[in-house]
Amino acid sequence: MDNLPIDIHSNKLLDWLISRRHCPKNWQSNFDEIRQKISNSIKDMPENEQIIKILNGGQFINYFHCKEILKILYETEKDTKNIFGFYSSQRIKDWKEIISLYENENVYLGEAANFLQRYVQYEVPSLRRQIAKAESGIKEAERKQHDYAKLATESNRLFHQELAKWGLDKNIDDQKEQLENLHYNLMLIAGSQPKAEILKIEEIKKALDYFWCFSKQIGQETNDMFPLLLFLTKDLNRSVSDISVYEWKYGKKPDVLLPPALIEIQKVETREENDEIDFCDDFDVAEIDFCTNGDSDEGIQIISSDGIDGDNVDSTILTAKGEEALQLLEHPLNCGTFLDELTILIGFLHFRIKDECSIDGNAQIYLSGISQKEITKNINLSELKCWLLTLQNIFNELGDTQRLQLLRLRTSKKLRGFVNEICYKIEQKKRLELKYFQLQQLSIEKQKQYLKEIKKANIYLKEIIEATKQLQENLEKDISNKYNGREVYIMGEINAVLYGN
């Protein structure tokens, strides 16, 4: 029976010591005096690497540390030993007194057991949770860094897309100067005549005639389908640039044209923004009403075209003013109608080319019979493809996004406000890219901070685990001496905490 080992659960160690009367229940009553004496004695210590290692071990000084310190002092203070074998060193006397207080009623066992439970139940698990939290923070920061990098790239793409939309140079590094000149550039473009398009009216006329002939042959006449195209192709000897909106609306050619007045170009400052990044994502650029009939903005000087004063024109003269004086295809609404009609005609040609290329089916027999009619029999597949290519080129040229934007800009009554909004949108896209870039850098800094925390926590965790193992070994040895050398094992949670994965 005396050879059986003693197994003590680590969480019940203190209760076990008290129940076996190895230390009293009130073992903590004299600890204030002991801790005070330890604090005072530490202030006067010799320079010794072993002592420094004990004092800087990251754990509380306990009874077993005091015994190690006293053993070291016997070596460092050996010069103070007299002929009777006693030491006159005050340091040795102080630490002997501390050990004596510890051994009084074995209170050191209560303190050591308390420290052991504290390390096992709180210190080590807390440090591991701290490390796990930091590792999770690193993964989250890496994910955010990746997301912010993608958002920054997308914002940069949208920024350059907006610059290209208005014809600004995206390769110039100093975008700030371009933004400051954006008001001037857009007003200059808006105040000038758009570039004249080369319209092949003859080709459009041929395609229209073919459409009408084909519609009559199949018995589905649509006389009101292409009003604008018919109007433009009515006189092939006349340039499209000579046809005004006024003539389209009223059927009469005006004697005098007074197009929208040019805006006196003034370079205006862009909006001043705070240098700090606004991290709110709920901003929205206001929609621009391009068809508003409001008054012109204050501060804009109107300069009449060709030196003609619109208010003093003779009433007997047909005068086209404002938007009605624009070329027909310069007006965004009419240009849109033109593109819509052109789209229908292009779709019809696609349909006919597909039918002509077909070599099978009853529909081919029917359409082949139609093709033998006098009006359409001379139109071959190559001509249809030529018309289609011509119409597609016209559509691509007139339907250019930048051109349509500038046409809306030209007819806008609130040009200054519109230009300001364009600048504001571009600035916001650039600032959004900067915001995401700074958030990306912040995520990188967080990763570095978490790595420092993990490194520091791992060092402290290693010290605590080593101190706990040493304390466990000392307690097992001390308790074993009280039971005539029987083996003592402190088991349970301590093994999972100290030796578990």
Image (spheres, rainbow, N blue to C red):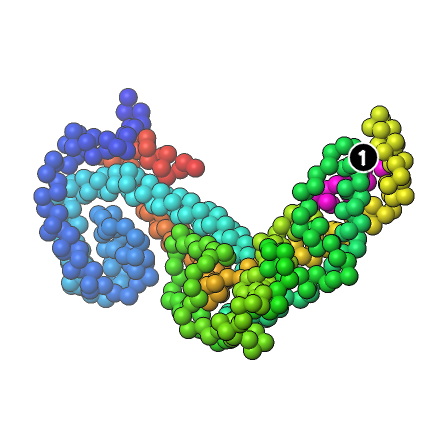
Q: Quadrant of residue 87 in the image?
A: bottom left
Q: Nearer the viewer, residue 44 or 477?
A: 44
The N terminus appears in which quarter of the rendering?
top left
Residue 475, given in percent of the width and then of the height, sits at 27, 39
The answer to if 345 sits in the magenta stretch is yes
Q: Is residue 74 above or below residue 28?
A: below
Residue 45, given in percent of the width and then of the height, sits at 23, 63
Q: Is residue 379 left or right of residue 257?
A: right
Boundaries of the magenta span: 343-356
**Which residue is at a point 78% across and 36% down the rendered structure image?**
216
Residue 466, given in percent of the width and then of the height, sits at 35, 46
**Which residue is at a point 89% across and 39% down the rendered structure image?**
374
Residue sitting farthest toward the front: 316
Can I make out residue 83 in this image?
no
Q: Which residue is mark 1?
A: 217
Q: Is residue 299 above or below residue 151?
A: below
Q: Nearer the viewer, residue 328 or 180?
A: 328
Q: Is residue 156 left or right of residue 438?
A: right
**Which residue is at a point 67% across and 42% down the rendered structure image?**
224
The answer to if 453 sits in the magenta stretch is no
Q: Nearer the viewer, residue 206 or 252?
A: 252
Task: Please name the predominant secondary structure of the magenta segment in the image.
Answer: helix
The C terminus appears in which quarter of the rendering?
top left
Residue sitting farthest toward the bottom: 307
Residue 124, given in percent of the width and then of the height, sits at 33, 43
- Number of callouts in the render? 1
Q: Characterize the local packing of mark 1: few (<14), some (14-19) or many (20 or more) Cα atoms within 10 angstroms.
A: some
**Which residue is at a point 17% across and 63% down the rendered structure image?**
89
At label 1, the amino acid type is: Gln
Can I make out residue 121 in this image?
yes
Q: Quadrant of residue 327 in the image?
A: bottom right
Helix, strand or loop at label 1? It is helix
